[in-house]
């Protein structure tokens, strides 16, 4: 039963008061902004990333206090800024329960929540051997913190060995001015510094240091996990990294103005259909800084304006396709946001003065000049796109073109509301529609022979725009999820050959009405 607002607020305040009494948390007045500066890169897309802007500000000095702040909110989406100072470790990080959180011992757990900023303040914030896990969450900012020596084996372990790990439908994360470091590779118990998998999109990593690790980070956990993408990496220092700087499986990555020093085995590894735009970076004392490595599943890249300083290349082979020494582009990648890239020659100096925690959050102006952070631009606190701003898929940010393959195809689905027809999904007439018998249901387009599809457009009928909430798009032949999100519109995904594709409405705010279920190959 839904509690009255006053009772929910009393419960929230009681949780925070209990945590304050136990130590490690201080309540402060609400703040106008969540973090210094504004999100950049792909984190600005899909509605933007503003974290806890406009919410209450809480000071935490333990991991338990961070969890208590999350659990003390009125709801899982209530904006909050958590200022962290001191050392966070296993000894001071415990599970806290509440209706607005889902936390766990031994890891900073940002699970099934939204609109949160974690920012290091004062003398600094160090997450020592304890990782930050983001799962089924959106609109998250992590800024000005150090995360070090997180292990997946040995003792203690945390977060699967990832310093920062994201998985399962994560949207809109900005990680800025952080220091992420390990003390070795997998044989020493460490995994990735910055990992994304299981449908994670619209992420920016900026002005950060990643160093002394076997693995810098990945996008996609396997060759079949290609529903991730739209990730920007800029003004970061990758230092003494063996590989994965990053490993990109499917999706789109934009890497500009990064300084790579001592990449020991391989750097930007674009594979399984991924497309990387690699521009104005400085590669130094490194090997195989760009290409497709350790697989025959090709990826692609557009390389412009990079500087190679003592870079060596291996010979091409069956599972090895280095981009060098010529660094010729194999694709083109369009970037949907505005940005100013420094010339590659000044990147080492700019990055050395700006990247990492404790650098005063300084940034570049795009002309090789370092300056204080700009004030954030007010924006939405919910990054979920509306019905007229659909979520693009992981491989193509542009609307689909070509022939609507649904015209002349077959269709079926779950029980339909009276007076509607599955044929209305594919008749090219926006005045007719299919509607499920309830608030949820599914509809399918099918063909007599295998057909290649890479994008879908779901058009709601007049008067019902915005009704469709959460959805999943499935390959009905294999049963696998091609994409998921919220709201009708354009859905892009890796090109898939199938005979039947299904759109599942998981949630809605009324009676969904789909006028057209369009399918395209391009």
Image (cartoon, rainbow, N blue to C red):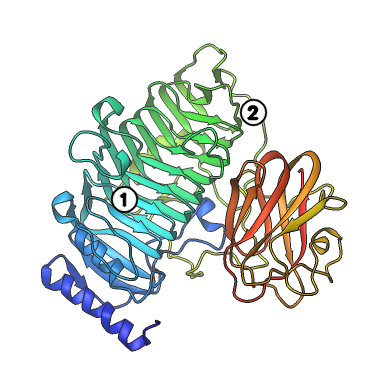
Mark 2 vs mark 1, foreground winner is: 1
Q: Residues within 10 Å of mark 1 (few under 14, many from 20)?
A: many
Q: CA distance from mark 2 to mark 1?
A: 35 Å
- Toward the viewer: 378 or 55? 55
Q: Which residue is mark 2?
A: 329
**In contact (CB < 8 Å): disc 2 and disc 1:** no
Residue 459 sits in which quadrant? bottom right
- Toward the viewer: 259 or 245? 245
Q: Which element is circle 1 on? A: strand
Residue at 84%, 71% (x, y): give it. Answer: 431
The image shows residue 498 at horizontal and vertical percentages of 72, 40
Q: Which element is circle 2 on? A: loop
Q: Residues within 10 Å of mark 2 (few under 14, many from 20)?
A: some
Residue 82 placement, left or right of 156: right
Quick check: 114 above or below 92? Answer: below
Residue at 51%, 35% (x, y): give it. Answer: 248
- Toward the viewer: 335 or 133? 133
| Any part of residue 103 in sight | yes
Residue 83 sits in which quadrant? bottom left
The image shows residue 207 at horizontal and vertical percentages of 39, 46
Tell me the number on the disc at residue 132. Answer: 1
The image shows residue 165 at horizontal and vertical percentages of 37, 46
Q: Quadrant of the N terminus?
A: bottom left
Quick check: 88 above or below 54? Answer: above
Residue 479 placement, left or right of 168: right
Quick check: 184 above or below 102? Answer: above
Q: How many numbered discs, if any?
A: 2
Of pointers 2 and 1, the one earlier in the residue sequence: 1
Residue at 58%, 42% (x, y): give it. Answer: 252
Tell me the number on the disc at residue 172. Answer: none
The image shows residue 116 at horizontal and vertical percentages of 37, 64
Q: Quadrant of the C terminus?
A: top right
């Amino acid at each position: 039963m839904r509690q009255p607002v006053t009772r929910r607020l009393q419960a929230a305040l009681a949780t925070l008061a209990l945590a304050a009494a136990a130590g490690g948390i201080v309540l402060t007045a609400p703040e106008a902004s969540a973090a210094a500066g504004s999100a950049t890169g792909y984190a600005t897309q899909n509605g933007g990333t503003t974290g806890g802007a406009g919410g209450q500000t809480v000071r935490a000095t333990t991991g338990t206090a961070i969890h208590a702040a999350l659990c003390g909110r009125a709801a899982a989406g209530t904006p909050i800024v958590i200022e962290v100072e001191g050392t966070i470790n296993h000894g001071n990080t415990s599970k806290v329960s509440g209706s607005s959180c889902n936390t766990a011992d031994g890891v900073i757990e940002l699970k099934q929540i939204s609109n949160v900023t974690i920012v290091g303040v004062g003398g600094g914030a160090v997450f020592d051997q304890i990782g930050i896990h983001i799962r089924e969450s959106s609109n998250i900012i992590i800024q000005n913190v150090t995360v070090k020596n997180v292990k997946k084996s040995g003792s203690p372990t945390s977060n699967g060995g990832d310093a920062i790990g994201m998985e399962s439908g994560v949207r809109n994360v900005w990680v800025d001015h952080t220091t992420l470091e390990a003390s070795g590779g997998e044989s020493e118990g460490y995994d990735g510094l910055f990992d994304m998998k299981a449908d994670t999109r619209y992420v920016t990593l900026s002005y950060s240091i990643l160093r002394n690790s076997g693995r810098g980070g990945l996008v996609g956990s396997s060759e079949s996990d290609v529903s991730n993408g739209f990730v920007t990496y800029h003004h970061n220092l990758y230092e003494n990294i063996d590989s994965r700087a990053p490993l990109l499986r499917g999706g789109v990555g934009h890497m500009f103005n990064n300084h790579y020093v001592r990449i020991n085995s391989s750097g930007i590894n674009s594979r399984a259909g991924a497309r990387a735009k690699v521009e104005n970076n400085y590669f130094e004392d490194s090997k195989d800084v760009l290409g497709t490595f350790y697989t025959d599943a090709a990826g692609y890249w557009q390389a412009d304006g990079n500087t190679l300083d003592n870079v060596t290349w291996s010979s091409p082979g069956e599972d090895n396709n280095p981009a060098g020494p010529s660094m010729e582009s194999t694709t083109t990648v369009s970037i949907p946001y505005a940005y100013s890239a420094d010339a590659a020659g000044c990147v080492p100096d700019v990055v050395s003065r700006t990247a990492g925690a404790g650098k005063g959050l300084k940034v570049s102006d795009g002309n090789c000049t370092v300056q204080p952070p700009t004030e954030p631009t007010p924006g939405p606190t919910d990054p979920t796109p509306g019905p007229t701003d659909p979520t693009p898929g992981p491989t193509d940010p542009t609307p689909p073109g070509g022939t609507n393959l649904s015209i002349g195809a077959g269709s079926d689905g779950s029980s339909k509301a009276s007076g509607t027809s599955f044929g209305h999904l594919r008749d090219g007439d926006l005045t007719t529609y299919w509607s499920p018998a309830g608030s949820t249901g599914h509809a399918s387009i099918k063909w007599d022979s295998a057909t290649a599809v890479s994008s879908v457009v779901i058009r709601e009928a007049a008067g019902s725009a915005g009704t469709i909430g959460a959805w999943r798009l499935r390959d009905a032949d294999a049963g696998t999820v091609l994409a998921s999100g919220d709201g009708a519109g354009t859905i892009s995904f890796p090109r898939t050959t199938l005979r039947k594709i299904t759109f599942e409405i998981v949630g809605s705010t009324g009676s969904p009405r789909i006028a057209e279920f369009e399918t395209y190959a391009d």
